Amino acid sequence: MFEKLFMLVKNNAGKAVINNPEIQEKDRDAVMNDASSSIIEVLKNQMDSGKLKDLVKYFQYPGIYENPLIDSAVNRFTNKLNNYYNITIEKATQIANDLIPPVMQEMIKQSKQEEQNNDFNLKALLSKLNGNMDIGPLLSQLQIA
């Protein structure tokens, strides 16, 4: 799943990272890895803080619940760009806004496709974030609620 997320970031990184003069060529893979990890950290934080129901709703109804999670991932990635790559906050925010929202939207889109054979389906994603623990029964209860 994490490799697929990195590839999703890489496929969306043209303008924001690969063709961006603010990011040195030697740093591009690391920046894309930081974008991926920012998304993972935000999703994992949702689970760890007991907001699993909100996370499930985010994937079920992305139009309603996208802003807090996307904003958190954008902020986290912005801080990494600023702290580790010495990119100004303004430019880092622009890069993060160009990259993170499309990646997260694509992730949601892919989660709804090929439910059984997809690393981004909700059950597989949440299991990976939770250390491969089977959360199927809990997920079923939350989706019914």
Image: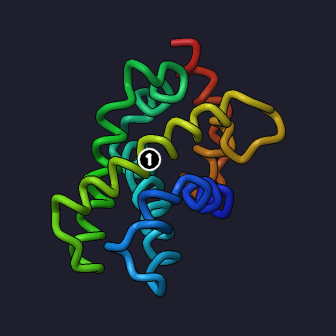
Residue at figure coordinates x 16%, y 58% from the top left: 90
Horizontal and vertical percent for residue 129? 55, 53
The residue tagged with tag 1: helix, strand or loop?
helix
Which residue ends up furthest to the top in the rendered image? Answer: 145
Which residue ends up furthest to the right in the rendered image? Answer: 117
| Residue in the foreground of this view, choosing between 90 and 32 | 90
Residue at figure coordinates x 40%, y 67% from the top left: 20
- Counting labels gives 1
Residue at figure coordinates x 67%, y 34% from the top left: 136
Horizontal and vertical percent for residue 107? 58, 41
Q: Amino acid at mark 1?
A: Leu
Residue 51 in the figure: left or right of residue 125: left
Horizontal and vertical percent for residue 23? 37, 75
Q: Is residue 25 above or below residue 106?
A: below
Q: Is residue 54 above or below residue 86?
A: above
The N terminus - image quarter:
bottom right
Visual colour scheme: rainbow
Give the quarter of the image for residue 10. Answer: bottom right
Residue at figure coordinates x 38%, y 49% from the top left: 98
Horizontal and vertical percent for residue 15? 46, 57
Which residue ends up furthest to the bottom in the rendered image? Answer: 26
Q: Is residue 3 above or below residue 84?
A: above
Instruction: Please tell me how crowded label 1 is: few (under 14), some (14-19), or many (20+) other residues with Cα within 10 Å.
Output: many
Q: Which residue is mark 1?
A: 43
